[in-house]
Image: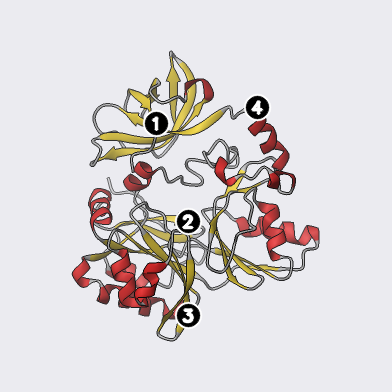
Amino acid sequence: MNPPLLSPSRRLRRTPFSDGVEAQGVKAYTVYNHMLLPTVFESVENDYRHLKDHVQVWDVSCERQVEVKGPDALRLIQLLTPRDLSKISANRCMYIPVTDQNGGMLNDPVLIQAAPDTYWISIADSDLLMWVNGVAASNGFDVTVREPDVSPLGVQGPKSDDLMSRVFGDSVRDLRFFGCGRFDFQGHAMLVARSGYSKQGGFEIYVEDGAIGMSLWDALFAAGQDLNVRAGGPNLIERIESGLLSYGNDMTRDNSPLECGLGHFVSDVQLSHCFGGRAMAEERATGSAQMIRPIAIHGDPVSRCDRIWPVYAQGMQVGQITSATWSPDFQTNVAIGMIDRAHWDAGTALEVQAADQIRPCTVQDKFWG
């Protein structure tokens, strides 16, 4: 049976690169921040293999920017996150958990200083713009909050340095992990960061004028023909192997950064200055009741996890699997789960109610990728 189709409307926005994505033969989309996010071109498995071996160009325009601009911009953003932002600069972007008044995760964006007193919060899939605007308005911060015309384009894979240097010059190779800078493309000073939603290495280009989007897309494909460049997108198999969490799937507002394994982004000093700081301080003192863990599910390949799969110990539920799939490289079913404290140690044998049957599974000491 053919899957149902998405009905297009103005609420489901195209991107500056949609024409290029369609010309490359996209086979599947998901909806992310009210935009189309390409997810499959050849197949999940073939796209995975290509990502690990070559280089891909990703339309990730759905990583919308919340721009906070004005004298109080950094002071406002520091209120949103338990991470200490004192080292943010024009040459360094930062991954930040954003929390509510109870310490629950609202988003896990990348923060970029785009210009003096101007910051972009490059968000995961949630309407964070409304929260930031509400915080600004209710506290009288001297800022403006808006969504600018900025559409990220990803270049991911082991050959990404080679491709990027051909389009932006060799100096782009000097960017360190989560480093960023301005690089020229046809007279446009584009902000480029060494970042992206894969562990294969790569960059994100923040295209500030949608009208030039297809010129950049075409230039990358022309420059990368001998590198076997293809269109791609965040790959389910690769992200689970690598332990890259998906907001709305592996973590929600019901989870704290500590439960999500993001404790190293939570500054004790900052907990007295951010939303949910008291709750996170109490959790840090007593220990988390549950935590994200890598899980190997044994047996034949499972169907892909599109809903919560409960995890059991001796018949009692002790957690849940939120993402799972078969890994061709590691020859096992790889999964991300939220597991209770008494059962999260590496080597703990559990059972999961997968889509098809009860399966044995084991907590791992680390993710695969």
Residue 365: which disc?
Answer: 1
Q: Which residue is painted at 52% across and 25% down in the image?
A: 340
Tag 3 residue: 189
Q: Mark 3 and mark 1: span between their CA atoms?
A: 43 Å
Disc 4, SS: helix
Q: Mark 4 and mark 3: span between their CA atoms?
A: 48 Å
Q: Which residue is painted at 53% across and 61% down in the image?
A: 93
Tag 2 residue: 32
Position of residue 57 in the picture relative to residue 132 (left or right) = left
> How far across and how far down the image is residue 350, in percent?
39, 20
Q: In terms of sequence position, does the residue under pointer 2 or pointer 4 come before the other?
A: 2
Q: Nearer the viewer, mark 2 or mark 1?
A: 1
Mark yes or no: residue 355 visible.
Answer: no
Position of residue 324 in the picture relative to residue 280 (left or right) = left
Q: Which residue is painted at 27% across and 67% down in the image?
A: 24
Q: Nearer the viewer, mark 2 or mark 4?
A: 4
**Residue type beneath disc 3:** Ala
Q: Is residue 353 above or below residue 117?
A: above
Image quadrant where residue 40 sits: bottom left
Q: Residues within 10 Å of mark 2 (few under 14, many from 20)?
A: some
Residue 286: which disc?
Answer: 4
**Residue type beneath disc 4:** Thr
